[in-house]
Image (tube, helix red, strand yellow):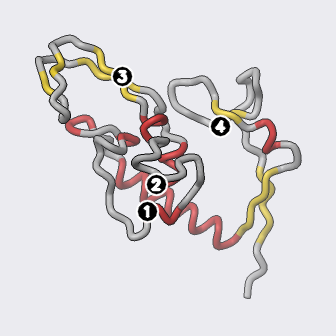
Amino acid sequence: YEPLRLSPPVPLDNKVAHADDVLPDGTKVPKNTKLFFFPWGMARDPAVYPEPEKVKLERWIPFSNPPAHEFPVFQAGPRICLGKDMAIMESKIVAAMLLQRFSFTLAKGEAEKIHYSAMLTMSVCNSKNQDSHNLWLIPEERKQK
């Protein structure tokens, strides 16, 4: 979950109220109001995530699913991503298979070029011109014991 916290697939999103509603904090939302929410910013709230810019995998140990409305990487409520559990399971399997067999390092000069792309879904971009979304890694096969 830590990589998803730091790089949510959709960093800024919005919803439209189709009826009068009330947010959990008591804020009234009239019908047809467009609400924006910012998962990227929510994930950097130091009150929720101490040292929010640091990658700390241990934040999630012991693991418990964060409330969907507080960690909206997969949306929440009736619009929650139907493939969420499958996506998480697949990413764990692929990561385990790759890391079991390979070590990875960034190609020379890549670290300085990495930034986020200016697209609807957040992705890594290695060009300020937004014309390359490659992340060049060098795999090295681990020695089998």
- Image coordinates of residue 111 in percent, x first then y, are 79, 44
- Image coordinates of residue 137 in percent, x first then y, are 77, 52
Circles 1 and 2, Cβ within 8 Å, touching? The answer is: yes
Name the N-terminal-most of marks 3 and 1: 3
Disc number for residue 124: 4
Disc number for residue 78: none
The amino acid sitting under disc 2 is Tyr
Vertical side of 69 occupied by 65: above or below: below
Q: Would you name the residue on which mark 3 appears?
A: 36
Vertical side of 143 occupied by 102: above or below: above
Q: Would you name the residue on which mark 1 appears?
A: 60
Discs 2/3, front: 3
Name the N-terminal-most of marks 1 and 4: 1
In the rendered structure, the answer to whether residue 145 lies left or right of residue 120 reads right
CA gap, disc 3 and disc 1: 27 Å
The crowding category of the residue bearing disc 3, from other C-alpha atoms within 10 Å (few below 14, some 14 to 19, many at least 20), is few
Name the quadrant containing residue 30.
top left
Vertical side of 11 occupied by 54: above or below: below
Q: Would you name the residue on which mark 2 appears?
A: 1
